[in-house]
Image (cartoon, grey):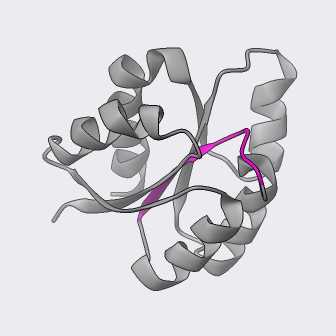
Amino acid sequence: MRKKVLLVDDNATIGEPVRPLLDSHPKFVVCGEAEHGREAIEKALSLRPDLIVIDMSMPVMNGLDAAPLLIKILPNVWLILLTTHDFPELCQLAGSAGIHAVVQKSKAVTHLSTQAEALINIAA
């Protein structure tokens, strides 16, 4: 059975390569998209995804602020943070927020499905 993925990013150009990448993967299907953290929380409640790929910088609510709330409502969800930022403290901040992995947006096409599959395999 394919794992459901929720994509959360205010930039539609990121979803253009990411959605087909995950939908074409035999283990994943994108079940929905959101433009900010608050919308992600609403959609997560109804869609019950197994994995959420969330942007760090968004209006209304960013990925780091949304992550603890998402984990509170879906304790078994896996979270991958997408970001353009690259600073040493980011992984620590992400981990403190409950995020399981960080992927640079510039490397999303090559690294995202590999990272997502690794997380899902941990849960198996």
- Residue depicted at x 52% and y 64%: 77
Check the image and report above or below for 31 versus 85: below
Q: Looking at the picture, how far across and down is residue 113, in whole percent?
A: 33, 33
- Residue depicted at x 34% and y 36%: 16
Check the image and report above or below for 27 versus 84: below
| 86 in the magenta segment | no
Name the image quarter holding residue 49. bottom left
| 52 in the magenta segment | yes
Question: 96 or 20, which lies in front?
Answer: 20
**24 to the left or right of 119:** left
Q: Looking at the picture, how far across and down is residue 32, in whole percent?
A: 38, 64
Name the image quarter holding residue 94. top right
**30 to the left or right of 81:** left
Check the image and report above or below for 108 versus 65: above
The quarter of the picture where the C terminus appears is bottom left
Q: Which residues are magenta?
A: 50-59
- Residue depicted at x 44% and y 77%: 48
Check the image and report above or below for 28 versus 15: below
Q: Looking at the picture, how far across and down is residue 109, in whole percent?
A: 35, 22
The quarter of the picture where the N terminus appears is bottom left
Question: 50 or 5, which lies in front?
Answer: 5
